[in-house]
Amino acid sequence: MKDLLSLRYWDNAMILDLIKHAYKIKKYPGNYYNKLKSKTMLMIFEKPSLRTRVSFEVAMTQLGGHAIHLDAKDAPLGKKETIEDTAKASSRYVDIIMARLFSQDAMEKLAKNSKVPVINGLTDISHPCQILSDLFTIHEKKKKLKGLKLCYVGDGNNNVTHSLMLGCSAVGMNISIGCPKKFEPLSWVTGLAQKNAKSSGSKIEILHDAKKAALNADIVYTDSWMSYHIPKEQEAGRLKAFNPFQVNKGLMKYAKKDALFMNCLPAMRGYEQTADVIDGKQSIVFDQAENRLHMQKAIILKLMNKI
């Protein structure tokens, strides 16, 4: 596979293979310091970023390579020139491209016209690097994936939700989505995840009750209610809709006693979760954030045939 654009075509074996390499990279980072000597990554950002930019740039540096940051405000994709032309020109200069874009369609065009691997750092539909890292983190904490139950509460029509559904169902994890009506995951993503679940023996639920979704969960996961693309005038309505889906101590009691709390960050205390949950003993959000670095090294090296 040349690119990582989504988890649509990723199966259990592929995901576990990357997790195996992420473990090795995290434990023995010095063994990888010159793997990408003289190699360059172009990082294209249409959306703002903290963890994606820093983790990818540090990853390239620690692997012996270099990363270039390109803000799309300075070179708007599809405006002065087509996305296709941007991909064809850029891929003659660099060895790999990571892009954080608004549109999945634009990401697909970028990859189709690039001579070098393209990594999806986030689009409106998909966030594969985040979820591969999350699965690594869950495996690190629980020592397995198959048979666990992950509960996601909040905005179901969300890039993190979509990628969680595909990733969890591929590795045999049960996933329960608790979201308001009209905020369900895209139906075609649910359909793909259901096919995965049939093969892996896992279960997918889309519920409109946070407590039912969290019942006996091993992991409770949430994400921002106010993604970057949400207009200001929609915020009040979203707060009203999502308030019953806040992760607080009361909701965590429905999960297992040893349940973990996850949020891909950034997080707003008092919104999608309360401060006592995200700062509490069950929270692993900063281990989760750190593992972006190790997993993204594994992704880069895998796509560049260095592991």
Image (cartoon, grey):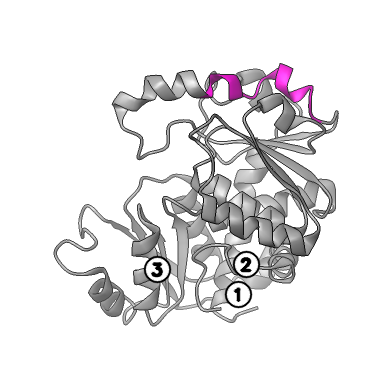
* Magenta region includes residue 249: yes
Vertical relation: 185 (above or below) 267: below
Vertical relation: 42 (above or below) 147: below
Q: Which mark is residue 108?
A: 3
> In the image shown, does 194 or 45 lie closer to the viewer?
194
Q: Which mark is residue 302?
A: 1
* Magenta region includes residue 233: no
User: Percent x, y for residue 226?
Assistant: 43, 31
Amino acid type of disc 2? Ala
Alpha-carbon neighbours of circle 3 within 10 Å: few (<14), some, or many (≥20)?
Answer: some
Asked if one can make out residue 223 in the rendered structure from this viewpoint, the answer is yes
Alpha-carbon neighbours of circle 1 within 10 Å: few (<14), some, or many (≥20)?
Answer: some
Left or right of 4 on screen, residue 142: right
> In the image shown, does 103 or 54 lie closer to the viewer?
103
What is the quadrant of the N terminus in the image? Answer: bottom right
Q: Are marks 2 and 1 in contact (CB under 8 Å)?
A: yes
Over which residues does the magenta segment extend? 242-255
Q: What is the distance, in whole Å, between disc 3 and disc 2 at their CAs?
A: 22 Å
User: Percent x, y for residue 181?
Assistant: 53, 31
Amino acid type of disc 1? Lys
User: Which secondary structure, mark 1?
Assistant: helix
> In the image shown, does 27 or 285 lie closer to the viewer?
285
Residue at figure coordinates x 14%, y 64% from the top left: 80
Left or right of 172 on screen, residue 156: left
Residue at figure coordinates x 36%, y 45% from the top left: 48
Q: Are marks 3 and 2 in contact (CB under 8 Å)?
A: no
Of pointers 3 and 2, the one earlier in the residue sequence:
3
Mark 2 highlights which residue? 298
